[in-house]
Image (cartoon, rainbow, N blue to C red):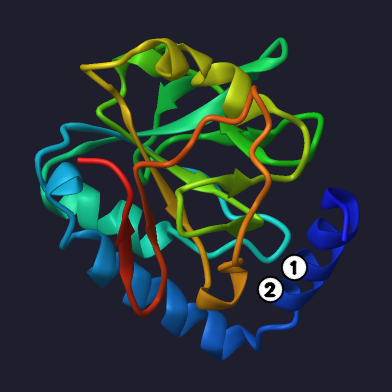
Amino acid sequence: MNRRELRQQLVAARKGIAPGAAHRAGLQASQQAWKLQILQRATRIAAYFPMGGELDCRALIEQAWARGRDVYLPILHGNRLRFRPYTAATRVAPNRFRIPEPVSGAELPATAMDVAITPLVGFDSAGNRLGMGGGFYDRSFHFLLQRTRWRHPRLVGLAYDLQRLTKIDRQPWDVPLDAVVTESANYIFAV
């Protein structure tokens, strides 16, 4: 199965999750995520607004606020992402893909984040991530492929258990994840 077909199948599966089950999965994933040392130590956390059946990370965002962490959401900046602060009072507006973005606040580069919680379509046991195909996360975090010692920020995928795959053929531009959090487990790929 090629990547396009695989994306279609996995997106359909996650969209097929009943609203109540999806809400519970988001709460469970938030609890799982805070078990990660890399998240516990993080001060600046990039998250996302869930779209198209993505696992809802709003409970994780609320927990971050409760723990005194700064939360940022991605904004489109050409073909890459930058990040703006996000609070409960932040005004957002849809971008060209209809994804809500903060409309004001200082824009920070990906390098300024401690942890980036990333949406995904699929993941495997090696930390490979299958995204929606636009390449925004891979381009924005490409600099991590050049680092051999100090990897910062840490990339943590957020997914349903059903999005776990046996193997994803990694492309040269794919930036691997450090961990993935699902509603039932944490998968750690890099320390």
Residue at left 32%, top 73%?
Answer: 185
Q: Which amino acid does label 2 sit on?
A: Arg
Residue at left 83%, top 69%?
Answer: 9
Quarter of the image where the C terminus is located: top left
Report the disc number at residue 175: none
Q: Residues within 10 Å of mark 1 (few under 14, many from 20)?
A: some
Report x, y in % for residue 102: 53, 29
Quarter of the image where the N terminus is located: bottom right
Query: Label 2's element?
Result: helix
Q: In this view, does 150 lie to the left or right of 92?
A: left
Report x, y in % for residue 154: 31, 33
Q: Which amino acid does label 1 sit on?
A: Leu
Where residue 138 sits, quadrant-wise, is: top right
Q: Is residue 175 left or right of residue 116?
A: right
Give above or below for 148 relative to 40. Answer: above
Q: Nearer the viewer, residue 151 or 61?
A: 151
Report x, y in % for residue 39: 20, 46
Where residue 183 sits, quadrant-wise, is: bottom left
Residue marked by disc 1: 10
Residue marked by disc 2: 14
User: Which mark lies nearer to you, 1 or 2?
Assistant: 1
How far apart, in angstroms, are the residues tagged by discs 1 and 2?
Answer: 6 Å
Query: Label 1's element?
Result: helix
